[in-house]
Amino acid sequence: MASCLAELRAAGAVVQDIAVRDGSRRMLVLVSVGYFLSVWAWGLLSPLAPLLREDAGLDAAGQALVVALPVLVGCLGRVPVGALADRFGGRAAFLAALAVSIVALAGLAAGGYRTAGGLLAGSALLGVAGTTFAAGVQVVSGWFPGPGRGLAVGVLGMGVCGSAAGGLTAVRWAGAYGMAVPFVVSAVLLALCGVALAVLGRDAPAGSRRTGGLSAALRLPITWRASGWYAVQFGVFVAFSVYLPVYLGNAYGLPAADAGTWMAAFVVVAVLARPIGGWLADRVPGRPLVVSLAALAVVAGVQAFTPPLPVVAVTLLAMAVALGVASSATLVRAAAGAGPSLVGLVTGLVTAAAGLAGFASPLLMAASYAVTGGYGAAVGLLAVAAAVAAWSAARPRRGARPT
């Protein structure tokens, strides 16, 4: 009798393990697709801005604000959304962010894009689409608490490709079918994703809820350390992705079309390297982050001297790989150091700090060019920042939770 009970318990454990594995894979697919579609919506106004400027009667400053507002809200909004994910579960926070995004898209499609006020309100609300990353990391960390977390976070991070999908389709659809169509299509896709997540998704069975708050997250050493690491990475990423066409045009005289191709290649390599960074972080914790930040410092240091264009191709390739690896490795260390009860909030704080750095780096590049006639000083400062970040990541922190 005892042996039969033991066998039944063992069989039950196997069934439960299979169910958990199936649930983790399903949730990874759901939140990764959801994040991809959210980023698609998040970036819609950028390619459409030149067309919307005429419809809404915006001046240059208004057009810039329409493009900047979603980015600012999406970055800073990850803090409260991460806190909500810790408190009520990542699935609920993700669904709430999707709902607000759908409302924003519906308002824009209904005619909000025709007035300056409607466009600005819609752009601010649409920024909530960018906050889904904090909820997604909370979900993924709950379903992948140990080995496999890094790869899962890397897969989730590949959702940033959604901005490319929006950029490729928005202007074409607006020109062919009307300005409202890109917003309608994006809203429908988000709604379908939300239904799938509501029906098929659930939080990890062993998830815990936050008992502390912002003060508890800020007391964790990993919050500050990871914020610094990620801020440096994102500052470099923006400088050599969004700002890359300007940089290559001014520094090397590269035509805009060619510079755009370089930018696209840089972003694709950096995104594809994210799962690799997560996979490495699962197998050799700590080392991928240090090595990738050190490599970033070296290649940025080389680029600070404005080498010949063939060398630039090599430095940019190495930089993109280092950034992709460092991104996932940082988030893995942040999640491990925060623990399950604060992972959403800590992720929100870390990525919000990175967003602010992303705003600052193009200004640094522009200031360097205005003062010195080149970008060497700005790129050199970024190289020094990456070296300091690598040194910080390599130093053990006394009394800190292992990361």
Image (cartoon, helix red, strand yellow):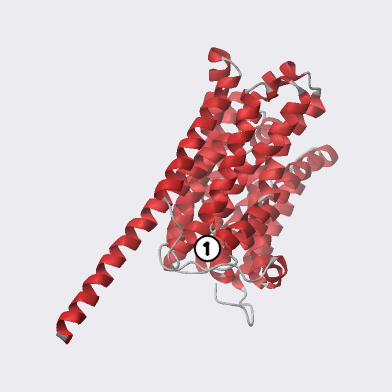
Depicted 49 relative to depicted 1: above or below: above
User: Is 324 situated left or right of 372 in this image?
Assistant: left
Using the image as rendered, state which of residue 224 and residue 376 is in the foreground. 224
Residue 221 appears in the figure? yes
Task: Indicate the quadrant where residue 260 lies.
Answer: top right
Along the line of sight, the residue nearer the viewer: 243 or 50:
50
x 30%, y 66%: residue? 16
- Quadrant of the drawing holding the N terminus: bottom left
In the figure, is residue 152 to the left or right of 42?
Answer: left
Q: In the rendering, at what x and y percent does residue 128 appear?
A: 64, 43
Is 194 above or below relative to 214? Answer: above
Query: Residue extending furthest front?
Result: 1
Residue 55 falls in image quadrant: top right
Examine the rendering and report whether any part of residue 255 can be seen: no
Number of labels in the image equals 1
Q: Residue at x 57, y 68 (%)?
A: 341
User: Which image quadrant: the C terminus?
Assistant: bottom right
Q: Looking at this rendering, what residue extends furthest in the right direction? A: 371
Up/down of 256 relative to 142, above or below: above
Question: Where does residue 176 sit, x and y in percent of width and height?
Answer: 53, 13
x 53%, y 51%: residue: 324
Relative depth, front residue between 242 and 18: 18
Residue 263: image location, x then y, percent: 58, 35
Mark 1 crowdedness (10 Å alpha carbons): few <14, some 14-19, many ≥20: many
Q: Which residue is mark 1?
A: 332
Residue 279, given in percent of the width and then of the height, sits at 42, 59
Mark 1: amino acid = Val
> Is label 1 in a helix, a strand or a loop?
helix
Nearer-the-camera pick, 304 or 279 = 279
Is 187 left or right of 114, judged from the image as shown?
left
- 93 over 125 or under it: above or below: below
